[in-house]
Image (tube, rainbow, N blue to C red):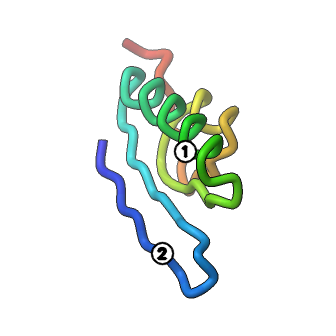
Amino acid sequence: MIFVISPKETSKYKIMIFAGEASADLQGAALGKRLKEFLPGIELTGVGGPRMKDTGFRLFMTVPHGAQ
């Protein structure tokens, strides 16, 4: 999992997470949920699966985790 934090002038943060498999999707979703608690205006983006999408990530690509 790789993530990048970049503050903007408006003090809004963006985080991009790349989760290529099921455990990374789970961890990315958990991280996103906690970050939203501390930074309500945070923008979450990246590549991941259904858990990250359900947490509110704007996904550029959805990675299916069913075929294991």
In the displayed orientation, state which residue is furthest to the left.
Answer: 2
Amino acid found under the numbered disc labelled 2: Pro
The residue at the point 30 percent across, 50 percent down is 2
Q: Is residue 1 above or below residue 49?
A: below
Residue 46, image x, y percentages: 49, 53
- Label 2: state its secondary structure: strand
Q: Which mark is residue 35?
A: 1
Q: Which mark is residue 7?
A: 2
The residue at the point 53 percent across, 81 percent down is 8
Q: Is residue 6 above or below residue 26?
A: below
Residue 64, image x, y percentages: 51, 29
Q: Is residue 61 above or below residue 34?
A: below
CA–CA distance between discs 2 and 1?
A: 14 Å
The residue at the point 47 percent across, 24 percent down is 26
Tell me which corner region of the image, top left, top right, bottom left or bottom right, holds residue 37.
Answer: top right
Quadrant placement of the N terminus: top left
